[in-house]
Amino acid sequence: MSTRLAKGGRLIDRSAALDFTFNGKRMKGFAGDTLGAALLANDQMLVGRSFKYHRPRGIVAAGPEEPNALVNLGSGARLEPNQRVTITELFDGLEATSQNHWPSLEFDVGVVNNYAARFLPAGFYYKTFIHPRPFWKHVFEPVIRQSAGLGKAPKDRDADRYEQAYAFCDLLVVGGGIAGLQAALVAGRAGARVLLLEQAAHWGGRAPVDGDVIDGKPAGEWVDEAVAALEGMENVTLRARCMAAGVYDHGYVLADEKVADHTPGDGRPKHRLWRIRAGKILTATGAIERPLSFAGNDIPGVMLAASVRDYVVNWAVSPGDRTVVVTNNDDGYRTAIALREAGLAVPAIVDARSAPAGALVEKARALGLRIEAGRGIAKVKGGKRVTSVAICLQAGEGAVIDEIACDAVAMSGGWSPVVHLWSHCGGKLTWDRVQACFRPDPGRAPLNHDGGAMVYAAGASNGEMTAAAALADATEQAGAVLAALGMKPKRAKAPVAEAVAEGPMEAVWIMPQGASVELKSKMWLDYQNDVKVSDVQLAAREGYESVEHTKRYTTLGMATDQGKLSNINGLAVLAGALNADIPQVGTTTFRPPYVPVTLGALAGEARGEIFQPLRRTPMHDWHERNGAYFEPVGLWRRPYCFPRAGETHEQAVHREVVNTRERLGLLDASTLGKIIVKGPDAGRFLDMLYTGVMSTLPVGKCRYGLMCNEQGFLSDDGVVARIDEETWLCHTTSGGADRIHAWMEDWLQCEWWDWQVFTANVTEQYAQVAVVGPNARKVLEKLGGMDVSKEALPFMTWADGTLGGFPCRVYRISFSGELSYEIAVPASHGAAFWEALHAAGAEFGAMPYGTEALHIMRAEKGFIMIGDETDGTVIPQDLNLDWAISKKKADYLGKRGQARNFLASADRWKLVGFETLDGSVIPDGSYVVAPGVNANGQGNTQGRVTSTYYSPTLKKGIAMGLLLRGPSRMGEVVEFNTVTGGTVKARVVDPVFYDKDGEKQNV
Amino acid sequence: MSEPKSALGGAVSEGFVTIREIGPVGMITLRAKPDAAGLAKAVKAAAGTGLPEVRRIVTEGDRACGWMSPDEYLLVLPYAAVGGALEAVGKAMAGSHHLAVDVSDARAVFRVEGAKAEQVLAKLSPVDFGALATGELRRTRAAQVAAAFWKDGDGFTVVCFRSVARYVFDLLATGAKPGSELG
Amino acid sequence: MLLLECPYCGVKAEETELSPGYEAHLKRYGPGSTDEEFEAYMFARKNPKGVHFERWRHTYGCGKWFLAARCTATLEVFGTYPAQVGEPPAEIIEKIKARRPDWKGYK
């Protein structure tokens, strides 16, 4: 059994006991524990079930490489699925439940998959669920989806908050082990701005656990001194609990800081995502131990050897009373020694090497430990817990020599440098034959914007596995980084770690090397996704040669641990099966994040009210107070209508239309784009921008204009006013102001930069109100201050003045067909002006109206709307707007595009009006059907509806649309399809339904 | 005629720094090439300052002139003084190609005050505050919208568009919540 | 995420402060041009693996368009320069030639 030892534990505080629960069972731990350590201390080795076969699974590791021990953490609004117990800090009241089992962890029905394992080989899904085809969608997929997945997504809104922050540094050091600390010391002393990140809550990495000695002191003491020295440097920032998740272009790094994971509900942000821009990046991310592939290596109690050591030394937790160590290298002996020194039994060290030698081997011998050299594990026995191991010759086929009773197995297959961050942005690797691992190739580092190296690696992550080598490497790499930054290291005595003479490791990919298929089908490579040695070998036999294809076929390394334990072993097995060299087979691609990052951190502050910016007009508060129903127009929120008590939106819209046509309507038109264009060349510029001529527009007058892109397609429209000799004001659509302003600047800066024109986007300077209807003039006259008569201010003119004491600019323009004034006042006066209009207009029947009434009224008048009648494939000529296109101008943006033969063709779909024969409203999106079918067997079409409404004015359905050679087909009856499958007949008519002669707007 | 109203009516939020909406503040966008005749005179007359260097803002009492782009300056002045300043600019630059417009109402202005004011902005803007020069006017984005700020006294003055005043205020207030200091 | 220095205001802007504008140094073809010329101007864009010239706008900064020469494979930036030029400045050409001896030129 696993238990807490009576003494020791460098990271725990025995005076601070913490209560927590696992699957409802009450347990105790100490401050400083990880959840993994605390579970083991409570003899909870079984923590989950595997994904495919539902085999019982225990804790394997002590860090982020843990493949098995994923739990649901918390509950309700604080439920987090798939949390690794090995990197979860224990806190009082923590609740964890195991996942991926049904109905319980101890008894899981899904385990039948285990007995059917030989029928579920690699690629099983691909092979089995192909036929019959319809079964995939209706039978197989729903069943597979039901059984798939690990934790369940939380149902409640996350109670925590998250944020992001930017950080900048000359050097980012990732990893707070001795290599990272030393590199930070060298760079910090040289004056560089250094940011040092450590994913765990404590500093120092492995060295204090491994008993290393630095400058004659225990490593732990050196670490404490180094951290204190760094904390004393103004130019150095240290962040623990901060995991560098990904390295991106030009020194950009994302890091996830667990600010309050261990103090939930204390009001601090749970996580903070750091968006770091570093001049250089140095990874000191250490190495990850590899499992060994022997039969039964997934039975709970089989753990990584160094992780066993971590539990003993860091948390005073014994994973087992009797632990067999199995290794192919000297480091495994450290675990045997640590266990023995903690008073625990080590019945044997099974060493695959025939003649192990070295200081650690000698020490183990001196302690009287039994060393089985040249031996391997034939099989681990046990169900939910290891009970014994059968040992055999490593060189043989697995004939059992001896069986040793034990309740834990500590395995060490050698170490793989953590090269993830090095590789994210293109850093290449080289195969180290001596240590049987991939390590960074410094000649092929990821590159920065200047073409120089962006990432450096130091210490174990650079393949320098011993403390002595790692420290020396860190000093050297930090020096190289400083040189690249144009800085010099200060002269200082480099720390030296005592060297331990280690014998060479021996690569072991399968144990024993001649294992039978039966044994190999019990050798797990990927614990989380249930991929075994036999699966990879099967893939190879089936012709998979690329590691990238094999990965996807077998799902090796595709679980949430992303193959931290399994990749190299899987690769080696594949290489063996293909009879190829490991470097020839190559590695899979490392992609961010290194450890999963919670979605909350990626969203940061962008949720709720600040999920995205909402643009509000100066009258927004009034609209809210008066019950407006809003609709988004770009990022603006505009009132769609102002429903009264008991009214539907439709009824409100119809009331607003009728009231505006018969009395007085007020529209908040502030969102309309307003761009000032000024300069000696402004007229010439606008003549290029618009299809019509703006340079001849007299001062004081307004003119409607169209803008096209270079392909000739209509992009925006609006009324232009000539302010003075050199100045024009261009109105754009509400959604178009920023885009059109950028479009103008693009041409002025990049094509006609010698033209003397300045622009300014003054959209938000003004609140603008459309005062519309037969009573419009009356209300303005009542406010008083300027002459708004037909004579003084005729249609399509503007004037400056005051109304009711408000400084304003009044445009006589109409988008409704009624007598209409659009009045701009400074935004700071917008709300007051709006209220003044309502007060003065009450006696004239003033009502606010929204965007839907505006749409209906413009459709009744046959006015086009950008985005309704246009969709990026429509030219002005399609909309019969030839009158707004100058034939005389030699050039304007879009003129050449419109000359293309298919756009100039007579067979275009062109704008017409439609009136249904039965008075109904044509459904939005309907097409005009044509005889026959196309090559895909779909019915042919000859037109489509673009705007369709019930007209409260005409009391029937009206529509505009595009129809093949439309204007030549007036009076013809055509048929629209409807979404429900029927058709509706409509007559082709003039798109101007209301006041064809424009008498009403011109009074 | 009503009193001019700033977008949020002077909203305040107290966190580990204080966020205050100020204003209305007078602002003029002045577009002109740096060598335009009368430019220095116009800026002196309207803002009381000399021409700022690239990316700098020069302050003189309650007025300032900021460099916005190679041919754009931001004149900051009391709201009521805008009309007179526009006239002065027009006079100084008569016959010289320029564009001067009142943008006072198109902006919202905030003060972010306190020892850790910088931390709140560092959550929103991809700006290296360690490299921010004295008197620097930084145009950038605050989360999803355009913003500009400069260090002034015991904090920063932040300018954004009026329509997103509420969004920017909420962003700043959220970033300044107690307990979320960057440490 | 790219980092490009705006040649107008000197800000080392990250990509989120910029807007992309695709290929630089295009010649506009208007009325009177042949279909082939117009097609080339409008639609035929370079997409090299290697040295490329692009337009970028410092949208969240000074608002100015500038041009950048960079390697699309390694993301090395050879330089940024104002947009008001017909072809890349000589010093940028020299720098590219020094870094990429096999480069065939910008045309």
Image (spheres, rainbow, N blue to C red):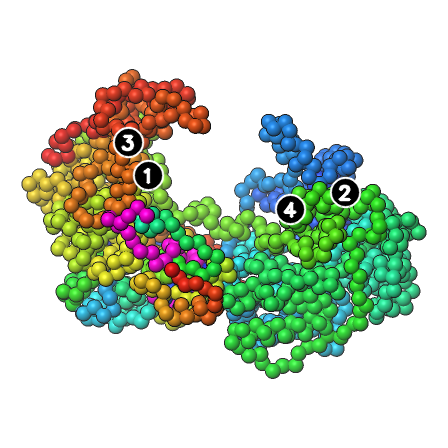
- Same chain for labels 4 and 3? Say yes or no: yes
Between B118 and B153, the one nearer to me in the picture: B118
Q: CA distance from mark 4 to mark 3?
A: 51 Å
Q: Position of residue A924 (x, y in %)?
A: 35, 28
Residue A678, compared with residue A845, is above or below; it is below
Q: Position of residue A43 (x, y in %)?
A: 79, 49
Instruction: Report the chain holding disc 2.
Output: A
Sequence-first disc among 4 and 1: 4
Between A339 and A656, the one nearer to me in the picture: A339
Q: Return the residue at label 1.
A: A873
Q: Residue at x 50, y 52 (%)?
A: A604
Q: Amino acid at mark 4?
A: His
Q: Which residues are magenta?
A: C8-36
Res A443 label: none
Q: Residue at x 29, y 25 (%)?
A: A950
Res A549 label: 4
- Same chain for labels 2 and 4? Say yes or no: yes
Res A907 label: 3
Q: Residue furthest top?
A: A918
Residue C22 falls within the magenta-colored stretch: yes
Q: Amino acid at mark 2?
A: Pro
